[in-house]
Image (cartoon, rainbow, N blue to C red):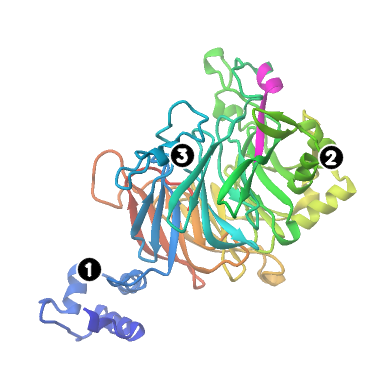
């Protein structure tokens, strides 16, 4: 086999000739079928042969990249090689891992005890959004952070030995959704997924109680890079209205110092079909717009350093009132039920995917700043947060398909957005300075995936220097892609070549242990 891999390009030509019906035959002392016979017997097409060569990594050779994926309800982190998509490691994080002894030794059991905040160690979690440490908005490969959505925890993984070093639990939240890092990893941001009583305690769920006592939070965990640990004593939170804060992204370069965070259920629906109230899904989708949260987190940090805020359950909290009064928090309308919130490589555009809107909506950070300066507000929300006028902050909208969620970027000025309902990846172009006017803000390609894609991950696709080349679709369903192994089908990771004008599907990888989210 090794003699066939001496020159990749030459071999590809020979293989394609073989598939096309050429007379090329090769055999070795240990292989009976010729190469042509093998290809014919497998029923492979030229494109499939090309994909096999693109993804094959010979024994003893290494992959070009590592991909860190959330492990979903396994509570762990999965490490894949790319392009082979071989599973190289399962990192024990929020659940014991017997092969490594994680959670069984005294040291690792203490990590699971969340710094003695709990009497007993939690032995399960739901990991969603890993984040690699950054320097100047580029991956530096030193640390990995991952959230536990079910239990409002954040873990620190040291990538020198791929092991979990610290778990911190949010003292004022019931859940979280995501972990993102600032451009130099000064902070890890944790947003609450679901509003909870603040301070955290039991409050009966009625509409009046919800509106008055429930709140969301943006938690900025201070990271000490020298120690490789989160420092809760230097961390802080910003109190937010009881909307359901979703994914967030730190600004970079021209938007440095700012955070953009999605929210949904700005209706403040609490369900209650037994009481003849609208079902949660209906109530939380009644309005055409939700609120994009625009947060000046550096100003918030300065206010905390000056003594503003109060200590609540051991962490400093800037109140909603103080955040509004000091120009820390603004809203902008965004298409309802948004999920993805991704900032372009230069920090100039913010891309939002509204699950119930066929468009991606692109906001301009410069327009946002100008609107704040001009006080171009369309009103305030029930808690007094100023709402920027939609037409003053939006740069463009691109119609790409049904169920847009998350967006990644390449090195050629293109964006890639997952389409949950269409089961597809949409490729579209950014505006200036990434593309010329005639090429800007256009849908240029669409690739079906199998099936119901959630997140997607491109090579360094959320940093200041995207790598292009490969993208992975993290699909929720596989259905007919693999042999029947019971009623519960594996998740399906699909590797896609994005180096050319058209996206090309290269391989499938089954994930049969949980529901991974972001990678």
- Label 1 crowding class (10 Å Cα cut-off): few <14, some 14-19, many 20+? few
Quarter the N terminus occupies = bottom left
Residue 330 place in picture, x, y as percent: 78, 41
Q: Which of 218 and 423 is in front in this view?
A: 218
Kindly report which numbered mark, 1 or 3, lies closer to the viewer in this rendering: 3
| Helix, strand or loop at mark 3 | helix
Distance from the alpha carbon under mark 1 to that under mark 3: 51 Å
Q: Residue at x 71, y 42 (%)?
A: 293
Q: Which residue is identified by label 1?
A: 43
- Label 2 crowding class (10 Å Cα cut-off): few <14, some 14-19, many 20+? few
Kindly report which numbered mark, 2 or 3, lies closer to the viewer in this rendering: 3
Distance from the alpha carbon under mark 2 to that under mark 1: 66 Å
Q: In which quarter of the image is residue 356?
A: top right
Magenta range is 209-219
Q: Which residue is identified by label 3?
A: 111
Kindly report which numbered mark, 2 or 1, lies closer to the viewer in this rendering: 2
């Amino acid at each position: 086999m090794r003699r066939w891999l001496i020159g990749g390009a030459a071999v590809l030509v020979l293989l394609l000739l073989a598939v096309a019906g050429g007379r090329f035959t090769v055999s070795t002392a240990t292989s009976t079928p010729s190469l042509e016979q093998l290809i014919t017997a497998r029923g492979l097409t030229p494109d499939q042969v090309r994909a096999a060569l693109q993804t094959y990594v010979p024994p003893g050779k290494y992959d070009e990249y590592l991909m860190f994926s959330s492990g979903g309800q396994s509570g762990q982190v999965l490490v894949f090689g790319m392009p082979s998509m071989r599973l190289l490691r399962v990192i024990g994080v929020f659940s014991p891992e017997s092969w490594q002894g994680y959670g069984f030794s005294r040291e690792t059991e203490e990590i699971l005890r969340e710094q003695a905040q709990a009497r007993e160690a939690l032995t399960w979690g739901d990991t969603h959004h890993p984040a690699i440490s950054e320097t100047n908005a580029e991956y530096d490969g030193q640390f990995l952070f991952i959230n536990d959505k079910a239990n409002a925890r954040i873990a620190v993984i040291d990538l020198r030995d791929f092991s979990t070093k610290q778990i911190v639990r949010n003292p004022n939240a019931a859940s979280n959704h995501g972990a993102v890092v600032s451009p130099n990893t000064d902070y890890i941001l944790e947003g609450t997924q679901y509003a909870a009583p603040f301070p955290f305690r039991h409050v009966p769920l009625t509409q009046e109680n919800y509106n008055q006592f429930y709140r969301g939070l943006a938690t900025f965990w201070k990271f000490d890079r020298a120690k490789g640990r989160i420092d809760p004593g230097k961390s802080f939170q910003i109190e937010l209205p009881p909307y359901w804060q979703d994914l967030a992204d730190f600004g970079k370069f021209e938007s440095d110092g700012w955070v953009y965070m999605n929210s949904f259920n700005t209706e403040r629906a609490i369900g209650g079909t037994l009481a003849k109230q609208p079902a949660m899904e209906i109530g939380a989708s009644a309005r055409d717009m939700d609120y994009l949260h625009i947060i000046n987190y550096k100003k918030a940090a300065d206010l905390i350093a000056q003594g503003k805020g109060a200590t609540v359950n051991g962490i400093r909290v800037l109140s909603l009132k103080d955040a509004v009064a000091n120009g820390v928090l603004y809203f902008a309308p965004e298409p309802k039920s948004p999920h993805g919130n991704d900032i372009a490589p230069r920090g100039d555009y913010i891309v939002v995917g509204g699950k119930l809107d066929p468009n991606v909506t692109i906001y301009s950070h410069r327009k946002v700043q100008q609107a704040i300066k001009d006080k171009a507000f369309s009103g305030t929300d029930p808690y007094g947060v100023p709402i920027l006028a939609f037409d003053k902050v939006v740069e463009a909208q691109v119609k790409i398909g049904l169920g847009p969620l998350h967006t990644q970027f390449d090195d050629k000025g293109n964006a890639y957005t997952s389409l949950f309902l269409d089961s597809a990846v949409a490729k579209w172009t950014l505006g200036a300075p990434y593309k010329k006017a005639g090429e800007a803000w256009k849908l240029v390609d669409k690739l079906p995936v199998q099936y119901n894609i959630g997140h997607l991950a491109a090579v360094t696709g959320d940093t200041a220097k995207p790598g292009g080349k490969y993208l992975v679709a993290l699909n929720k369903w596989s259905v007919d892609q693999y042999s029947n192994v019971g009623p519960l089908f594996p998740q399906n990771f699909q590797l896609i070549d994005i180096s050319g004008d058209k996206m090309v599907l290269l391989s499938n990888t089954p994930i049969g242990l949980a529901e991974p989210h972001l990678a």
